[in-house]
Amino acid sequence: MEQTTTSGQTAAPAKDTASEQSSAAPTAADDAGTTAAQKKKRVPKRQPAARETPAATKTPQQPVVLRASGLVKRYGQTLAADEVDLEIRQGSIFGVVGPNGAGKTTTLSMITGLLRPDAGTVSVLDHDVWSDPTAAKRDLGVLPDRLRLFDRLTGAQLLHYSATLRGLDGATARKRSADLAQAFGLGEALGRQVADYSVGMAKKIALAATLIHSPRVLVLDEPFESVDPVSAATITEILRRYTRGGGTVVLSSHSMELVQRTCDSVAIIVGGKVLASGTMAQVRGRRSLEDKFVELAGGRVVAESMEWLHSFSD
């Protein structure tokens, strides 16, 4: 019921006024809370220090175990190696690829001390191959291309001979020979003369002899040549286990697919020059290694003048 004041004005009911006051009170509190929240937002928060995630953590670079600097080799008027520079790091499988006559074997021969360069230096684990050959070659295992083996020896005798040349005692030589024969699938062939081996088996026994003294650096010239796919897969797995243990492999091959699949670093040599060198990803980019190799080697040659090849003889 409305009440009339002495001035004639009608006053609102007392309970409604109290209700308005009570409803206004939260609004003021909300405004105060909003203002405080705005002020709080204006205060810059100290950002916590960024933590490196495992993906962002950089893997420390491995030390260089084999370095070739400015290698030059001439055969008469032919320049087989022209200022070849290579850096090969511990734990890597480093591929050296190039066309026939590019200087791959010449380069690997100079790296291992089998061929003296006309200029340049090579060091293996900081030992110069030519001024300190004994120390440098102690850490090397070398499989040259077209290696002549003592093929009148049995496989077991060849491995034992290779071990004793490296200073291993008889018991160690026999133990390692058995391990290598099992790994390479040569167990039943150890009692036969190497002369009776197939080309692939001879390659495997030669590689086993290269590994028997547990070198820190392996240099292999065409280790997969004449090797069947199953044996190639076995050799690849052995090399990967070897590098996971801290060893280092340098190999040459004409198979671009195999090198791309096996190696983590690569150098492309054409005409005695290193035209590209680095990790596999750096060298090939988004293309295959074969495409990059063909580009640097001068592209594919199309024989347009051989129409006679399509006219078959009767």
Image (cartoon, rainbow, N blue to C red):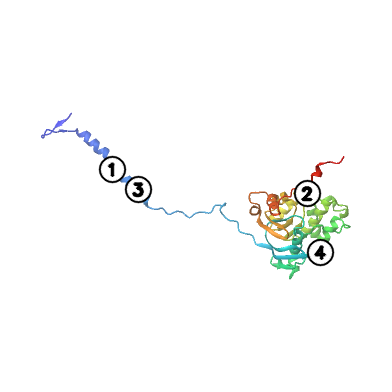
Q: Amino acid at mark 2?
A: Ser
Type of the residue with mark 4? Leu
Name the image quarter holding the C terminus.
Answer: top right
Q: CA distance from mark 4 to mark 3?
A: 83 Å
The tag earlier along the polypeptide, 4 or 2, is 4
On the image, the x and y values in percent for residue 14 come to 19, 34
Q: Which residue is disc 3 drawn over?
A: 38
SS assignment at label 4: helix
Q: What amino acid type should be assigned to the residue bearing mark 3?
A: Gln
Mark 4 / mark 3, whichever is N-terminal? 3
The Cα atoms of the two marked residues, 1 and 3, are separated by 15 Å
Q: Which mark is residue 28?
A: 1
Q: Image quadrant of residue 309?
A: top right
Crowding at label 3, few (<14), some or many (≥20) Cα neighbours within 10 Å? few
Report whether residue 164 is seen: yes
**Sequence-first disc among 2 and 1:** 1
Helix, strand or loop at label 2? It is helix
User: Given contact means CB atoms under 8 Å apart, are the residues at marks 4 and 3 in contact?
Assistant: no
Q: Which mark is residue 165?
A: 4
**3 and 2 marks in contact (CB < 8 Å):** no
Q: Earlier in the sequence, mark 4 or mark 1?
A: 1
Q: How far is disc 4 from disc 1 in space, using C-alphas?
A: 96 Å
Q: Which mark is residue 305?
A: none
- Nearer to us of marks 4 and 3 is 3
In which quarter of the view is residue 88 placed? Answer: bottom right
Do callouts 4 and 2 mark residues in contact (Cβ within 8 Å)? Answer: no
- Between the residue at mark 4 and the residue at mark 2, the CA separation in whole angstroms equals 27 Å
Mark toward the start of the polypeptide (1 vs 3)? 1
Q: How many marks?
A: 4
The residue pinned by badge 2 equals 231
Residue 113 in view: no
